[in-house]
Structures are given as C-alpha cells and as structure tokens.
C-alpha cells in the first residue's frame, strides 16, 4: 500500500488527488494490509461493519459521487483506471468504512440530534440563501437534486455528519501542541537570511556568433524531441450554465427594485460613530453627573473621578447595529459630534454617552446596482431551466445527434475548438481563448476518444459543460525548416548558459581560495548587490525563488552558483547573515501554526480512534463485489 501511495504521488495529478484524499479527517488506513479480512460473505454486499452492510449499489453511488467531487476540485475528470492506479478505490472504501464505523458508534452510544438542530444547520447554510439573503427552499431543492440527493436522504446525511463530528471533536478534545515542536517549526519557518550576490547576464557571455547551418542541423538532430509537435484534439463544446442562459434584459424594474429594497443595507456602508460611555448603577447618580457636566465638568474628568479606565470608557467606532441595547443605540445616533447625552435608561444601567468622530455612511442607489441585480435575478431564474434543457440535450444525444446539431435545435451557442494540445495551447503556441477556465475540459478531451458519448462536466456553481471530441491530430516530429528560428534561439541560449556557467565556476574557485565577492566584482567590472530579510520559499525582490532556496541550504559565509529562471541568467551568491526569530506565542503567524498543528494532531488521534473502533466492531470486505464497482482487480498495494 505504501509503495503504491509513493508511486501514485510521484506525478502531479497523483499528488493533487492524494492531497485531497489525505486531507479528510475521517479516513482510516487501519483496514489495509490485513489480507484475511477479504472474505466473501454476501454477493450483494461490499462490506459489513458491525451490524451494517454496505450494498454494491450504495458503494457504487458513493464511489461515483466522490470521484465526481474530486474531479471538480481538481478541475479534471478522473477515470476508473486513474482512480485504481492512484489507490482511490481503496481510499474511498476506507473513508466509507470509517464513516459507517462512526455511525455504528453513535448508535451504540445512543447519540442523537433534534430535528430543529438539523433544520437550523441547513437553513443557515449560505449555499441555500436566495437573492434576499434568506433561506430559499427552491434553491435548496435545486442544489441537492443536482447533487443527487432527495430531501430526506440529504437531511439524514447531515444528521450523520453532525454526529460523526461530535464524536471526532470529543475524541480529539482541546489538544495542546508541545512547546518544543512549536518552537522548532516556528524557528524553521521564521528564520531569515541575507546574501550578497553578483548577477551574470548575457552581456557577461561575450559575443556569441550565430550557429552555422551545419551546427544548427546537428543541434536540432540531437534535440529533435524538444521541438516535436504535440498531439492536438478537435472538439465541440456546449456550455450550459446560469450565466449562459440568463436574460437580464427580461427582468422588470419592479422586480429588481423589490430585491433592492429587501437588501438595501448590503448596498452601502452604515454610519459609524466613535462612542464613549459611563454606566451608572443608580439613575440619580447619572442625573447628578449630567448636571455637573452642564456646569463645565468634562466627560474625561468625570470618568477619572469614577475610576473608569480608558478601555472601559471607549466603546470604539461602531455602527448602530453593533450596539446591543436599542435605547443606547438610538440615543448615541441622535447626538452630534462631541455632544454628551442626557441620562439614558438602558438594559444594564443608566448611561451617559459622548460621541466623537462621525464617519458618514454610504448608500448605492438602485440605478447604481440595477444591472448587477438584474443579472443575479436572471441567473437564479436560469437555474430552474437547466434541468429541462439537460433532459432535452440527453434525449437528442441518445437519438444520435451531435452537440452542434443539438445546440442549433435548442438555440444554444456551441463552441468549436479546431485544435488544442494538453497544455491548452493551439498550433500557434498561444492559449486557446475559447476554452472555459473551469472545469478542466482539456483533461477530459484527452481522456476520451472520437465518437464516445461523454458525461457532462459540472461547472460551479450550477452549470454543466457538454463536450464531443471530434478529431485527433497525432504528435509528430517537426522538420528543421518548420522550427528554424526556435532552434537558433535555443542554441544561442544554451551557448550563453554554458559560458555563464564557466564564468561562475571560475568565480567560485576564487571565492573558495579567499577572494571576496567585492574583489571579483571589481575584476569583472560588475557590482555586488544585497538581499536581506530573505524567508524560505519566497522570492527576494527580483531574485528567483531558486536563489532563496539555495541560500537556505548554505552555512553562513559559504558561496554558491545558481542558474536563474532564464537561460541567460546566473547568480553567484555568498550567505552573509543568518537570523533566528524571537519566539512569540502570541504572534499571528505562531497562532496560525499552532492551529494547523492542532488540526494535524487531532487528525492522527481520530484516525487511531477509528482504527480501534473498526477492530472492536469488526470489518469484513467482499473482494468480488468490490471489483464489480471499481473494475479490474483491487489487490493490496
């Protein structure tokens, strides 16, 4: 298994997928590597956890949904073959087993949640809010339907998720990060370095003559693969999203104005006031104090007499809605700047108020936001049309129609892509402008074939992208005549890089022999530059990140030579200073690190808890049934 994970993560797609998978809290690794749990027990069940059986159909739905979700997050589709190669079949089964184990634990402990708790969680979810900022039932039903849920199933799943979270949070508790660990990582992350460096550019390479035809031909022959034409794919795309279908011009002003009035506060900033207050337990004390103020006593002196600290006196600069007590809020926002109120009977006592600086509020007019409001309303309407259009598209495709034919019939706009390579570029080397930014349609095009009926890709938040791959232009070797200018430019860059490398090596030899960087710079009519406060993994000014990375691998006083981001660029550096940070547990970056480590430790502890729970409850897997879902073999990796 570990060897399989290591192999899977050796590619960028593997790292991305495994990063998503490993990031989940409730994923168990305990059941893998134990061969004897793979015993056949029920032809229609994939697994049995305690008293719960996971049917083939249940796991198939779960597996398909999770692959689609991962594909959306990675912006590229994941085939079953790719999923098996990356071990996702086992990881997702492990996740489902872990979730079911926690569900069994919740039953055994007789944990429960009221219907009101579940309803509050769902209605407070921002994803289900409509244009007025409130819970929108039609939007809720549309979203869960598009996600493949019925309402009852979605509510049941939310109940399970909340119960699992309760168990996980109880197990992990309020973990404390060991101070030694925290200090060590904070020191590593916060360490700073300074360097002196000489930048070598094409000017230091001298005159580089153009290659002769014979030299260019020889250079091309030995590097022909670098100039190879990639495979191109031709495609028809049919986007189907609220923004594509929306018709803002059809939204009437009356409807848009009603939405504006409902959300008027969100189209501006409220007035804010600098507020001070003194609270009196007895109303008569407040009255007496106010009389003294009218005779010349200052508000600040009154506060000092009563022993009120500056922190307790100053409420801050607040909006009216920030003040909990309605009576106090009304009084505070009726005063002028620097005015002191009469005694105000509030919820927590009688108060005297003083207003300082007043920051006026702003309010956009309906005309200012009308276009955006109409667009938003139109897109909300369009969401309800999408499902009907999807059915029509699917019916046409089932009847053998192409996407281009379907688009014309339904008065939709199809996008024709004549040629695109795996990097999203056309034959001219430029990005294909017509390609949508999301999802990763290029990855999907290169994972299918001509004539294949492909599943539509989901486009956040509620759209789809249909695609037909209609042609393939195979990769081929280009001739020298096709790429002569590119070959000549690369040959010249390589020659410059070779000369700069030799020059940098000579400088390093002299530095190691005792010469200073200033002396070497003077010999070559160059200047010495300085980069200070360098931090790990970040570019320092105009220096590439690779220079920073090299600086943090060297001891103080050591020299090195590093190539730049361009072929005609090289740096000779000397580390001049290493500064360890002062540890401050209250610093924002240390607090952020603490929270990150707490989450990591919590994940480990919950994982161990689930492993023990699985062992106690008992987990049995049906290998043959599992293969029916994921295809191929699912042998231990």
Image (cartoon, rainbow, N blue to C red):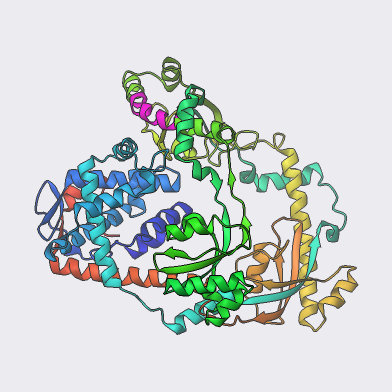
Image position of 147 (left or right of 75): left
Residue at x-position 74% and y-position 38%:
484
Give whichever of 85, 142 is nearer the camera. Answer: 142
**Where residue 303 sits: x, y (%)?**
56, 77
Residue 577 appears in the figure: yes
Image position of 394 (left or right of 511): left
Residue at x-position 56% and y-position 39%:
424
Region in magenta: 378-390
Residue 452 appears in the figure: no
Quarter of the figure with residue 402? top left
Image position of 201 (left or right of 126): right
Residue at x-position 71% and y-position 60%:
564
View extreme (top): residue: 409
Quarter of the figure with residue 134? top left
**Where residue 217 sits: x, y (%)?**
73, 43
Give whichever of 67, 500 is nearer the camera. Answer: 67
**Where residue 617 sits: x, y (%)?**
13, 66
Quarter of the figure with residue 380? top left
Image position of 59 (left or right of 330): left
Please say if 474 is above or below 90: above
Q: Is residue 544 magenta?
A: no
Residue at x-position 77% and y-position 47%:
215
**Where residue 381 sits: x, y (%)?**
40, 29
Please say if 431 is above or below 249: below
The quarter in which the C terminus is drawn is bottom left
Please say if 631 is above or below 302: above
Give whichever of 179, 497 is nearer the camera. Answer: 179
């Amino acid at each position: 298994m570990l060897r399989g994970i290591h192999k899977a993560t050796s590619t960028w797609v593997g790292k991305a997928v495994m990063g998503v998978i490993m990031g989940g809290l409730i994923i168990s690794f305990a059941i893998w590597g134990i061969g004897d749990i793979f015993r056949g027990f029920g032809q229609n069940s994939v697994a049995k956890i305690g008293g719960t059986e996971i049917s083939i159909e249940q796991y198939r739905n779960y597996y398909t949904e999770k692959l689609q979700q991962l594909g959306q997050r990675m912006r590229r589709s994941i085939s079953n073959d790719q999923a098996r190669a990356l071990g996702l079949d086992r990881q997702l089964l492990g996740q489902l087993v872990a979730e079911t184990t926690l569900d069994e634990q919740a039953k055994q402990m007789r944990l429960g949640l009221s219907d009101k708790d579940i309803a509050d969680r769902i209605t407070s979810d921002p994803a289900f809010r409509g244009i007025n900022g409130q819970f929108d039932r039609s939007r809720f039903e549309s979203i869960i339907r598009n996600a493949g849920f019925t309402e009852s199933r979605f509510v049941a799943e939310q109940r399970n998720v909340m119960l699992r979270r309760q168990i996980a949070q109880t197990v992990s508790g309020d973990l404390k990060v060991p101070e030694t660990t925290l200090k060590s990582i904070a020191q590593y992350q916060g360490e700073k370095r300074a360097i002196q460096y000489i930048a070598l550019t094409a000017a230091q390479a001298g005159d580089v003559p153009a290659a002769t035809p014979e030299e260019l031909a020889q250079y091309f022959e030995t590097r022909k693969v670098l100039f190879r034409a990639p495979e191109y794919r031709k495609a028809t795309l049919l986007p189907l999203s609220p923004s594509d279908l929306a018709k803002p011009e059809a939204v009437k002003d009356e409807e848009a104005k009603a939405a504006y009035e409902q959300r008027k506060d969100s189209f501006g900033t409220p007035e804010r006031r600098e507020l001070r207050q003194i609270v009196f337990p007895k109303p008569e004390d407040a009255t007496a104090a106010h009389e003294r103020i009218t005779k010349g006593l200052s508000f600040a002196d009154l506060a000092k007499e009563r022993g009120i600290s500056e922190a307790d006196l100053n409420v801050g600069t607040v909006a009216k809605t920030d003040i909990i007590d309605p009576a106090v809020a009304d009084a505070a926002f009726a005063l002028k700047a620097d005015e002191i109120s009469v005694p105000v009977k509030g919820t927590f006592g009688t108060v005297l108020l003083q207003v300082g600086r007043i920051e006026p509020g702003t309010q956009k007019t309906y005309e200012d936001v009308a276009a955006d409001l109409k667009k938003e309303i139109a897109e909300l309407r369009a969401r309800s049309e999408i499902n009907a259009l999807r059915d029509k598209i699917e019916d046409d495709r089932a009847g053998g129609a192409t996407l281009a034919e379907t688009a014309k019939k339904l008065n939709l706009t199809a996008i024709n892509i004549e040629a695109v390579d795996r990097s999203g570029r056309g034959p001219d080397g430029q990005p294909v402008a017509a390609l949508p930014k999301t999802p990763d349609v290029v990855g999907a095009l290169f994972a299918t074939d001509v004539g294949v009926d492909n599943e539509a890709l989901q486009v956040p938040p509620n759209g789809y992208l249909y695609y037909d791959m209609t042609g393939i232009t195979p990769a081929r070797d280009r001739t020298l005549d096709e790429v002569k200018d590119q070959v000549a430019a690369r040959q010249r860059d390589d020659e410059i890089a070779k000369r700069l490398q030799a020059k940098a090596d000579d400088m390093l030899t002299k530095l190691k022999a005792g010469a200073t960087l200033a002396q070497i710079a003077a010999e070559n009519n160059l200047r010495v530059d300085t980069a200070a406060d360098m931090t790990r993994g970040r570019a320092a000014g105009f220096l590439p990140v690779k220079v920073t990375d090299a600086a943090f691998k060297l001891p103080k006083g050591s020299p090195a030579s590093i190539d730049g981001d361009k072929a005609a660029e090289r740096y000779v550096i000397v580390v001049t200073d290493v500064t360890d940070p002062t540890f401050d547990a209250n610093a924002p970056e240390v607090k952020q690190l603490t929270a990150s480590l707490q989450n990591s430790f919590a994940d480990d502890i919950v994982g161990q808890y689930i492993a023990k729970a699985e062992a106690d409850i008992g987990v049995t897997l049906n290998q043959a049934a599992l293969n029916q879902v994921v295809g191929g073999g699912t042998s231990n990796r």
